[in-house]
Image (cartoon, grey):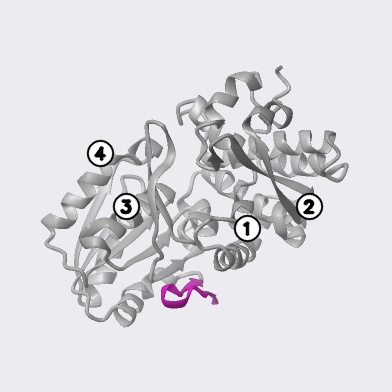
Amino acid sequence: MATVKVNLGEDSYEIEIRRGLLDEVGEKIRSITPKAEKVAVITDDNVSPLYGARFKKILEKSGFEVRIISFPAGEESKNLGTFGNVLNALAEFDMSRSDVLVTLSGGVPGDLGGFAASAYMRGIPFYQIPTSILAQIDSSVGGKVAVDLPGGKNLAGAFYQPKGVFIDPDLLETLPTRYVHDGLAEAVKYGCIGDAELFEIFENLKDREDLKAHIEEIILHCVLQKARVVEEDQFDNGGRQVLNFGHTIGHGVERYFNYGTYTHGEGVAIGMSLITAQSEKLGITEKGTAERILKVLKKLSLPTSIGIPAHELIPEIMHDKKRRGKKMTLVLLEKIGKSKLLTISTDELKKYIVTGQD
């Protein structure tokens, strides 16, 4: 088992990574939050049929009263309406401030459930049990919890750290192939921005079985990097912004297509490809970097371009929460494993956002 500690003073917690870990989570929660009597499990209608009943028994065996709170899977559920429904369900369960919320899920219930934990009674303890690659390597770590608004993604939220994150790679066995690749886009991002060794793992992968053999190693590489960045910049005011590589364009792509055509990871893959191709042309990025990224993403069956001109995409990018007035910070690569932040005027976006359809 690998254990990574996220050092944030009073908000410190541990991330545990091991196959078969789910069966031990009840006792681990009991030991960390001994006063808890009730556990609300926030999940969706994809995960609940697979693991809900099993996990309920695991928690009940540790002496908890358990309520499963499920909602429809997908980004479209990550809204204020679902958020309100979850808060009402917590109240109907008569939860106290010493009780516990657990997210058993991919990124959407993880983000929404964590935000509900931060808001209910002004904050109750919560734990993350991520069931998708994207959640295991990225969204479950760092304490950024949120819901979407009509004006943009993750515009209502908080920084609220979990009491623990339990990562069981066995839970990935039920993932559809598309969502395996979706999550791996974020892992490729970690290789690009600060871990050349991780990127080379992807370059050397032979097939799906080889990927399965390396998945714990890939998860650990990502978690270690995410934990380090979060420790240095817990509230996303500086260096943590490097985690947004590919996201400025990616979020614009998701929004342009109304969150229905491309998954989050697919949007990030497109964003990494387009921004690096352009930064290489501008002499910012080492030559050949864009081609290396392209080859890895294609190996993972991820998209690398879109069939719309940049001038149609830029208005969607302007909704990005990284914009500060007329300034926006872009994440660019100097080379694989080394990234930099570049703050530009929004008027300059067209120089860096080029889709090839212009």
At a point 44% along the width and 68% down the height, the residue shown is: 166
Nearer to us: label 4 or label 1: 1
The amino acid sitting under disc 2 is Ile
State the CA–CA distance, disc 2 to disc 3.
36 Å
**Residue of label 1:** 239
Report the magenta residues as a range.
Answer: 1-17
- The question of residue 234 being in magenta is answered with no
Tell me the CA gap for discs 2 and 1: 17 Å
Q: Say which label, 2 or 1, has the lower sequence index.
A: 1
In this picture, residue 124 sits left or right of residue 228: left
**For the residues marked 4 and 2, what is the alpha-carbon distance in whole angstroms?**
41 Å
Q: Which residue is mark 3?
A: 43
Sequence-first tag of 4 and 3: 3
* Quadrant location of the C terminus in the rendered image: top right
* Residue 279 occupies quadrant: top right
Circles 2 and 1 in contact, beta carbons < 8 Å: no
| Location of residue 96 by image quarter | bottom left
Crowding near pointer 1: few (<14 within 10 Å), some, many (20+)?
some
Residue beneath label 4, please? 81
Q: Are marks 4 and 3 in contact (CB under 8 Å)?
A: no
Residue 292, x across and y down, in percent = 80, 44
Quick one: SS at disc 3?
Answer: strand
Q: Which mark is residue 99?
A: none
Residue at the disc numbered 2: 336
**Badge 4: how crowded within 10 Å, few (<14), some, or many (20+)?**
few
Residue kind at label 3, given as amino acid type? Thr
Nearer to us in this view, 226 or 210: 226
Label 3 or label 1, whichever lies nearer to me, is 1
Q: What secondary structure is found at the residue carrying circle 2?
A: loop
Q: Which mark sits nearer the N-terminus, 2 or 3? A: 3
